[in-house]
């Protein structure tokens, strides 16, 4: 992969990560008139500050039911009551006005997104892909992936494989600034991966300058993220060394990596 691919992630015009809580991002995407799409607003305050007295938002997209992703929805609806809320079919998301499932299309203002079911972190987690963007919630992180609270290793591995199969120029808009912490683990798995080394150096520079490490391109994640590289011999060998036994397939490799990461203190 050319080095410049790793060193030039970009923010699409109108795309903005709003910091929330300790390490969350709420994503905004604005059209030419300033109307916004809001993704996973766990807190209303950053959204209201960003939108001010501007035009009402087009819609809210929800990836899953956790409070740091939906906690601000009620307040935003109190401010803009006609805003559609797209969310997976999960009774724990009471504010949804439009339920979505795998394969559905979400038409939002001038944009269109395809809904992908990506269970593993939660049973009903979805991602939204379109317009060169991937809003993936807590399924895929830059250089990492989410914990499995309600799913199995097989489910999570299959969900990540679905995301990895999307076009490589997709901008990965995940919901947490975990990249530097994930980088330490990724280097423990593949210390000799040159693409990973370049990505880590760039992330360090971005964070030192007070800039977000996101979005990242999906191509870069496939080159650097060990959880998307369970097929790679170097990752397979590292997982076997950690497990102390042979591993028969990619799902077993993934399960070892996720367990290893859970306890990693590097």
Image (tube, rainbow, N blue to C red):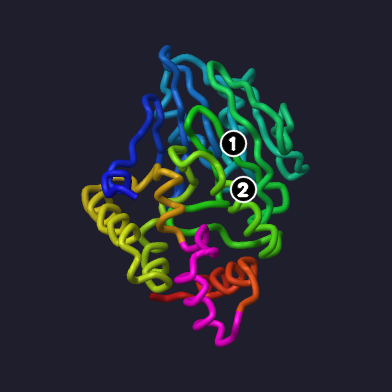
Q: Residue furthest bottom?
A: 244
Work out whether 236 lies above or below 39.
Answer: below
How many labels sit on residues? Answer: 2
Q: Secondary structure at mark 1?
A: strand
Stretch of the chain drawn in magenta: 226-246
Magenta stretch encompasses residue 239: yes
Residue at figure coordinates x 66%, y 56% from the top left: 120
- Mark 1 against mark 2, which lies toward the viewer? 2
Residue at figure coordinates x 52%, y 61% from the top left: 227
Q: Is residue 136 visible?
A: yes
Q: Is residue 40 left or right of residue 251?
A: left
Q: Is residue 22 visible?
A: no
Q: Residues within 10 Å of mark 2 (few under 14, many from 20)?
A: few
Residue at figure coordinates x 25%, y 47% from the top left: 210
Residue 254 position in % (x across, y down): 58, 67
Q: CA distance from mark 1 to mark 2?
A: 12 Å
Residue 230 position in % (x across, y down): 54, 64
Residue at figure coordinates x 42%, y 12% from the top left: 33
Q: Is residue 203 left or right of residue 85?
A: left
Q: Secondary structure at mark 2?
A: helix
Quarter of the image where one finds residue 231: bottom right
Circle 1 sits on which residue? 128
Q: Which of pointers 1 and 2 lies earlier in the amino acid sequence?
A: 1
Residue 123 position in % (x across, y down): 72, 52
């Amino acid at each position: 992969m050319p080095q410049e691919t790793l060193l030039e992630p970009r923010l699409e015009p109108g795309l903005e990560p709003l910091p929330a809580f300790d390490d969350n991002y709420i994503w905004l995407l604005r059209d030419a008139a300033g109307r916004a799409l809001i993704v996973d607003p766990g807190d209303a305050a950053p959204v209201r500050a960003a939108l001010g007295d501007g035009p009402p938002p087009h819609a809210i997209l929800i990836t899953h039911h956790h409070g740091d992703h939906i906690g601000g929805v009620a307040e935003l609806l109190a401010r803009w009551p006609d805003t559609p809320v797209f969310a997976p079919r999960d009774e724990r998301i009471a504010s949804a006005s439009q339920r979505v499932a795998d394969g559905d299309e979400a038409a939002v203002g001038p944009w269109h997104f395809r809904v992908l079911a990506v269970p593993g972190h939660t049973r009903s987690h979805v991602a939204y892909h379109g317009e060169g963007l991937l809003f993936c919630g807590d399924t895929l992180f830059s250089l990492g992936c989410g914990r499995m609270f309600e799913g199995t290793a097989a489910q999570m591995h299959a969900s990540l494989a679905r995301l990895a199969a999307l076009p490589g120029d997709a901008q990965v808009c995940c919901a947490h600034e975990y990249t530097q912490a994930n980088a330490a683990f990724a280097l423990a798995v593949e210390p000799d991966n040159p693409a990973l080394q370049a990505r880590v150096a760039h992330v360090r520079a971005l964070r030192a300058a007070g800039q977000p490490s996101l979005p990242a391109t999906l191509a870069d994640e496939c080159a650097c993220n060990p959880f998307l590289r369970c097929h790679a011999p170097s990752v397979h060998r590292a997982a076997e060394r950690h497990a102390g036994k042979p591993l028969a397939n990619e799902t077993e490799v993934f399960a070892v990596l996720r367990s290893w990461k859970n306890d990693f203190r590097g």
